[in-house]
Structures are given as structure tokens and as C-alpha cells.
Image (cartoon, rainbow, N blue to C red):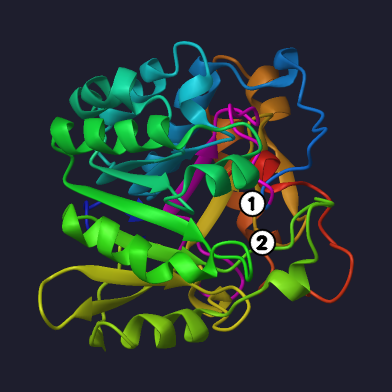
């Protein structure tokens, strides 16, 4: 066991000596958008009766913090579309061992919830934004209106979170010509931006992932045509590699599962909305925590032990391959974005 920055013992160490201190929790696989890299157009969602209850989500989050996890990110689908989800943030925000409570969102609901989230203890928010053009936004999201996400970004800024970051998935011949504009949009508002290589999860049918792929290095080269960037050793506890502009303090991050595999120092596990603990984004190794929770409603010991035991099946890394059909058939919205 190791001692975390919060002073608690980290009991979650896998076979490769990696200490797990970061949990991503999906509270729903549903979303009010249908982004082409995230889900198919005719998605079949998990029946609501099969989802973890909000009380179960909070309970599992508490046990993870007792085992040494100090960062929890709430994801979806779009997490803010789940009814009464703010209660999960309130419960997790009270946990003594939790250093960092964060959210990934598409921004469409932030004009309603930003202030409540801040009051509940959310420190940082990642907001997905792939284009600044309404027509493209409609094509990429299939259903969305750009103005709702932009209004959400404004609401987040007004609420005063410690950090706000834009996440952008760049697809060749879809939005790669907007890389500079996205950087300058974010930095003009004092927001960091990270570019994410598309991950081959689920069959999407919208585009050929190999043809649409654009590497982090190519994106970096495009940005350097306009701005000088210097690499940093900064980290927010996830897989992003960061660069800083030399003319101000703004950061550009890259999440590069293909070109710069980040598996060797993986510190993360994921809890799906129906209660599967995924030990790797790109593998199917998992444990059914919903079954454990419901079989032991008043006893945390079996749940605690199931989480500890799950570390023994965490694989070394993923096997992503853009040139073949996805090995992982679950979509990103089912995994937790």
C-alpha cells in the first residue's frame, strides 16, 4: 500500500505496480447529442431499471475514496441529463478523502446547473466542443445546436470553477481546419484545450476511422505554425500531455491513445452506468459491482473486497487498431466518455 496526498492508504495496486487513484463514473449512457465518434445513429440504450441508482453510485464512490482514490470524474452519456444527478455531486463532494471532483459534459445543461455544481464541490469541468460552425456542429452531433454549448461555457465561466477545459476530437476533412480557431477560442477565455485522438469503440457507421484519423503530432505541428509551444511536466491526473504557449500561460493538451500510448502509467478505472467496473478503456476485463452492491445492501466489506480483487485483472493496456473492425463493441457513451 502507498500513502496518497490526502493521507489515506491506497489499497488499489495492479499486477504491474500501478497505483489506481482515479475513478471515472458514468451515471447514464443517454445523451441529448449523438456525436458521430461516440455512438451510432440508432443507439439502443440501457433500460433505466438496469442502471445503478444514484445512492448506489454515491456508495461506490465513497468506498473507492476509502481505498485511496482521490479523483473522481462524473461522465456519461451526458451526465446532466439524468434526473436528480446533482445529488451525486453533493454526496461525493462531502467525502474527506476526495481531492478532486470533476465533470465531463457537452455543455448543453450547464446554464441550468453550473452554480449548483460549483456549490456541490465540483472543481473542474471538461466541456466537449469540436467545431465553432453551426452547420458542422449539427453534422457532428446529429442533433445539437452550437449556441447551447457556447451558453454552457459562458455559464461555467460565470460560476467560477477552478479550471475549465475544452475537449476536442479532430477528424480529418471534418473539422481539422478549425484547430487554430478552437485553440484561440479557448485561450481567449482563459480556458485550456485538449485534443483527443478518436478511439475505436463500437461500430459507428458514419466514417472510416482510419481515414479520419489525425495524430496528436500533426495537430501540434499545425498549432506551432501560429503559436510557439513548450512541453511541460504538468498533469491533472489523467492521460493528457500538456504544452504551454510562450506568449501567455494558456495550455494545450493531447490525449493520444494511438500515437503516444499512455497505458504504462495508467492510474484509472471506469464504472459504467449499469455498474460494471471496467479495468481498461480498450479491453473487456470487468467486475459486476451492481451485483455485489445489491447482494450486500448494508455491508460494505464485500464491495470493498471486490474492488481490491478487481485490480488483479487490470490488463497492461489496450489493443486499439484503427485498420480493423472494433474489438470493443461497446460505444464510448456506454463506456463513460
Looking at the image, is 87 positioned above or below residue 328? Answer: above
The residue indicated by pointer 2 is 312
* Towards the viewer: 148 or 288: 148
Evaluate if marks 2 and 1 touch, with contact meaning CB atoms under 8 Å apart: yes
Q: Secondary structure at mark 2?
A: helix
Left/right of residue 230 with respect to residue 149 in the rendered view: left
Q: In which quarter of the view is residue 110 placed? A: top left
* 26 falls in the magenta region: yes
Q: Could you say where residue 117 lies in the image, as x and y percent from the top left?
A: 27, 26
What secondary structure predominates along the stretch shown in magenta?
loop
Q: Could you say where residue 8 lies in the image, as x and y percent from the top left?
A: 28, 50
Q: Quadrant of the N terminus?
A: bottom left
Residues rendered magenta in the picture: 10-36
The residue indicated by pointer 1 is 309
Q: CA distance from mark 2 to mark 1?
A: 6 Å
Q: Could you say where residue 139 lies in the image, as x and y percent from the top left?
A: 64, 45
| Residue at x 31% of width, y 31% of height | 151
Looking at the image, is 322 positioned above or below residue 52? Answer: below
* Towards the viewer: 99 or 299: 99
Amino acid at each position: 500500500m502507498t500513502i496518497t496526498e490526502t493521507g489515506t492508504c491506497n489499497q488499489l495496486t495492479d499486477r504491474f505496480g500501478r497505483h489506481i487513484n482515479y475513478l471515472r463514473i458514468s451515471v447514464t449512457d443517454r445523451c441529448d447529442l449523438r456525436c458521430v465518434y461516440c455512438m451510432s445513429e440508432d443507439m439502443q440504450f440501457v433500460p433505466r431499471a438496469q442502471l445503478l441508482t444514484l445512492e448506489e453510485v454515491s456508495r461506490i464512490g465513497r468506498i473507492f475514496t476509502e481505498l485511496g482514490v482521490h479523483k473522481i470524474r462524473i461522465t456519461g452519456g451526458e451526465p446532466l441529463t439524468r434526473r436528480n444527478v446533482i445529488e451525486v455531486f453533493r454526496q461525493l463532494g462531502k467525502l474527506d478523502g476526495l481531492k478532486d471532483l470533476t465533470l465531463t459534459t457537452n455543455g448543453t445543461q450547464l446554464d441550468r446547473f453550473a452554480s449548483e455544481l460549483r456549490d456541490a464541490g465540483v472543481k473542474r469541468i471538461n466541456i466537449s466542443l469540436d467545431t465553432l460552425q453551426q452547420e458542422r456542429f449539427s453534422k457532428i452531433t446529429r442533433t445539437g445546436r452550437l449556441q447551447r454549448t457556447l451558453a454552457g461555457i459562458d455559464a461555467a465561466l460565470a460560476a467560477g470553477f477552478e479550471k475549465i477545459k475544452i475537449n476536442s476530437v479532430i477528424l480529418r476533412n471534418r473539422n481539422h481546419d478549425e484547430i487554430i480557431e478552437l485553440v484561440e477560442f479557448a485561450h481567449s477565455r482563459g480556458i485550456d484545450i485538449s485534443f483527443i485522438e478518436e478511439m475505436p469503440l463500437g461500430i459507428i457507421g458514419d466514417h472510416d476511422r482510419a481515414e479520419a484519423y489525425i495524430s496528436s503530432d500533426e495537430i501540434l505541428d499545425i498549432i506551432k505554425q501560429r503559436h510557439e509551444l513548450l512541453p511541460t511536466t504538468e498533469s491533472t491526473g489523467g492521460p493528457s500531455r500538456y504544452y504551454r504557449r510562450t506568449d501567455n500561460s494558456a495550455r494545450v493538451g493531447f490525449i493520444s491513445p494511438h500515437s503516444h500510448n499512455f497505458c504504462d502509467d495508467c492510474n484509472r478505472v471506469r464504472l459504467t452506468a449499469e455498474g460494471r467496473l471496467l479495468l481498461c478503456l480498450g479491453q473487456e476485463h470487468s467486475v459486476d459491482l451492481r451485483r455485489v452492491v445489491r447482494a450486500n445492501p448494508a455491508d460494505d466489506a464485500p464491495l470493498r473486497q471486490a474492488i481490491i480483487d478487481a485490480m488483479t485483472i487490470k490488463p497492461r493496456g489496450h489493443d486499439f487498431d484503427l485498420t480493423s473492425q472494433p474489438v470493443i463493441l461497446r460505444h464510448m457513451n456506454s463506456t463513460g466518455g
